[in-house]
Image (tube, helix red, strand yellow):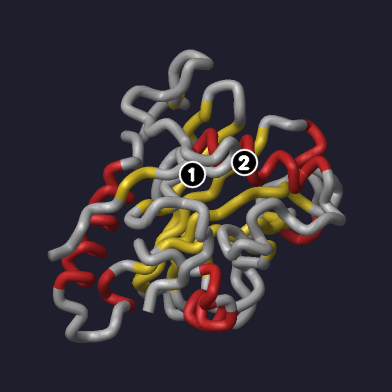
Amino acid sequence: MEQVRWPDVPPCYRFTPTARDLIRYYLNPWVASPGQTPFGEPEGVVCAADVYSVDLGTLTSRLRRFGHDDGNWYFLCVARWKDGNAGNRMSRAVQGGGTWHGSGKRVAVRRHGYRQTFEYRDAGGGKSAWLMEKFGSSLPEATDGEGVRVICRVHRTPRAAADGDGGEGRQEETDEAQFRSSKRPRGTLSHEGGSSGGSGGAQTPLHPKIPWSPSKLLL
């Protein structure tokens, strides 16, 4: 059964943030106040959790209440330096033997930071049913000797869903196609977003901080 997290929001609305929304309203406040409870965590919107600490099936099962009905989880975490060498490459290894494999170039989110897509591979190097989009902030304090503070949108593809989902399975296939279509061609760093007035076609938030958009009704 779908959880009712926000009783003051009209029915049939879902949490569909843009890259700028995630960085501005969720990542940056966490970067500025790392010791405080992240904005949106008490409501079950986002969660501070290490996506490199354990395989994704275990992590998302443990934090099931933060999963959205479109197959997404939003985790605030620290992407640590490889071998502890600050300023060097980031470690993508997951405890237990898996790894996050980069599947796209880093894309700039204008005036806010960047985003990059990854796919999770098991200890044997095989592809799994998990995808991740990592968002980083342009704030200098997001980077320190430990690593870089980021927010990650983790997505479960239909391969990880239970058999016999019916309409929900078809909806997840659509979500996966939209997720993959956000990748940019390999090449120079591209930019996302327009003027400060917002990206084209964006929905006007019903909440001053939390972005929303109407979901499709499945009859």
* Lower position in the chain sequence, tag 1 or tag 2: 1
Q: Where 171 sits versus 87, above or below?
A: below
Residue nearer the viewer, 166 or 114: 166
Residue 158 in which image quadrant:
bottom left
Residue nearer the viewer, 212 or 10: 10
Q: Classify mark 2: residues with Cα within 10 Å, few (<14), some (14-19) or many (20+).
A: many
Q: Which residue is mark 1?
A: 116
Q: Which mark is residue 5?
A: none
User: At 16% from the left edge and 70% from the top edge, which residue is drawn?
Assistant: 167
Residue 31 in which image quadrant:
top right
User: At 54% from the left edge and 68% from the top edge, which residue is drawn?
Assistant: 66
Give residue 34's position: percent from left, percent from top: 82, 51
Residue 80 falls left or right of residue 93:
right
Question: Visible in this render: residue 97?
Answer: no
User: At 61% from the left edge and 51% from the top edge, which residue is drawn?
Assistant: 151
Q: Amino acid at mark 1?
A: Gln
Q: Classify mark 1: residues with Cα within 10 Å, few (<14), some (14-19) or many (20+).
A: many
Q: How many marks?
A: 2
Residue 217 falls left or right of residue 146:
left
Q: Quadrant of the N terminus?
A: bottom left
User: At 28% from the left edge and 84% from the top edge, which residue is drawn?
Assistant: 162
Q: Which residue is mark 2?
A: 136
Residue 218 falls left or right of residue 62:
left
Q: Are marks 1 and 2 in contact (CB under 8 Å)?
A: yes
Q: Amino acid at mark 2?
A: Gly
Give residue 94's position: percent from left, percent from top: 60, 71
Q: Secondary structure at mark 2?
A: strand
Residue nearer the viewer, 36 or 132: 36
Give residue 48's position: percent from left, percent from top: 69, 62
Q: Where 10 sits versus 141, above or below?
A: below
Give residue 67's position: percent from left, percent from top: 48, 69
Q: Quadrant of the C terminus?
A: bottom left
